[in-house]
Image (cartoon, helix red, strand yellow):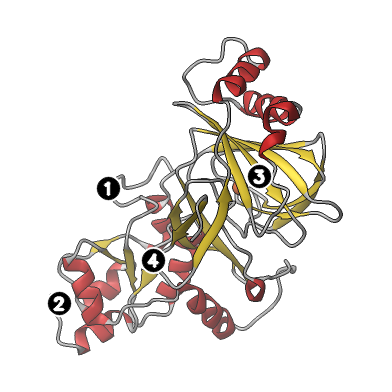
Amino acid sequence: MSAGVKSVSDGGNRAFSGRHRPGVAQDAIALCLSGALPGLGDGVLSARELSIASMAVAARSDLWEHLVPQQRDGRWYALLHRSGNYDVWLLGWDPGHETDWHDHGGSSGSFAVARGRLVEQFRRPRTGTAGSRAVRAGGAVTFGPAHVHNVTHGAGAPALSVHVYSPALTAMTYYHLTDYGFSAFETVSVESPHGERSHVADEEQAFTEWDRRAVDDLLASVRRDLQRRPVPREAMEALAAGATLVDIRPAEERALEGEIPGATVIGRNVLEWRLDPQNDHRIPELARYDAEIILVCSDGYASSLAAATLRRLGLARATDLDGGYHAWKAAGLPTTA
Ligand SMILES: [Fe+2]
């Protein structure tokens, strides 16, 4: 690895690299922002403040032009400024560059295009479907803490954009866009907005309208995205190591079949509301984006669909017990029956 290149491993078999270009006069950026936003305090920036900040810095090429590399061999980025409540980044885009679908770990943000053209695909808040918009030089997009998007280089010349996040960006969750909707699959700590994420061509998927399919096809699609579904013995080991088994069977089934000691019972009809970290009716100790949740139903079918829904809420480690309660009991593991 050459000097200046940072890489982040997700712990799996992929690594991402991008070229970080240090050497920014942070004071000059701070001065630019204080001029654009007089009275800016220590709190989280509002949508209006984020938009003004990104556009103000994008318009001041004299502050960052010297950072744009003449020779490029991949994604590159530069941290322009970081304070206690926000950070500012310059990102370069060449043809073919793409971020993949991601959120911003609870940070709100704005990006302004300083040069060239970008295309933002985004998750619509109400429907969960994908929309798309082009952002040209001089334009900006501002988004809230739950925003999920995939930004690509638009047609034509290389592009430059200025990104502002508040609170400062610390982690991002990546998503697959599946037939069932968006499915979170990994959360990574990041040192940059998305300059380190390489494009994975074979995962490229165009959004299609909702279609009609048999539930078995839906189940197969969902399980491909869950990737890891523990068998009973693995689930018991995970439970001992701190994971939570969540039994979603109705009361009459539990009474008839027995229960798993140590499992948490949450009815299927309230599951999303109890585990959504943003919901007022959540269970605080369980509703975390990094929680290891293993759902249990009778045979491991409905639990797969429910786990996929939890991933759509951002619980990237949610999965389900392969074979359900019946497999657990058949393996001779503890039950109340
Ligand atoms: Fe982003």
Residue 93 rendering spot, x and y as whole percentages: 72, 51
Which mark is drawn over residue 335? 2
Measure how far apart labels 1 and 3 are at the Cα level: 37 Å
Report the mark closest to the observer, 4 or 3.
Answer: 3
Task: Find the residue positioned furthest to the bottom.
Answer: 330
Residue drawn 41% across the image and 40% down it: 280
Q: What crowding class fits label 4: few (fewer than 14 Cα within 10 Å), some (14-19), or many (20 or more)? A: few
Measure how far apart labels 1 and 2 are at the Cα level: 24 Å
Mark 3 = which residue? 91
Task: Name the residue type under label 3.
Answer: Leu
Tell me the element at label 2: loop
Residue drawn 69% across the image and 55% down it: 72
Residue 206, quarter of picture: bottom right
Task: Name the residue type under label 4.
Answer: Gly
User: Taking 232 as reference, is 180 left or right?
Assistant: right
User: Taking 249 as reference, is 133 left or right?
Assistant: right
Tell me the element at label 4: loop
**N-terminal-most mark, 1 or 2:** 1
Q: What crowding class fits label 2: few (fewer than 14 Cα within 10 Å), some (14-19), or many (20 or more)? A: some
Mark 4 = which residue? 11
**N-terminal-most mark, 2 or 4:** 4
Q: Nearer the viewer, residue 204 or 69?
A: 69
**N-terminal-most mark, 2 or 3:** 3
User: Taking 127 as reference, is 41 left or right?
Assistant: left
Mark 1 = which residue? 285
Tell me the element at label 3: strand
Task: Name the residue type under label 2.
Answer: Thr
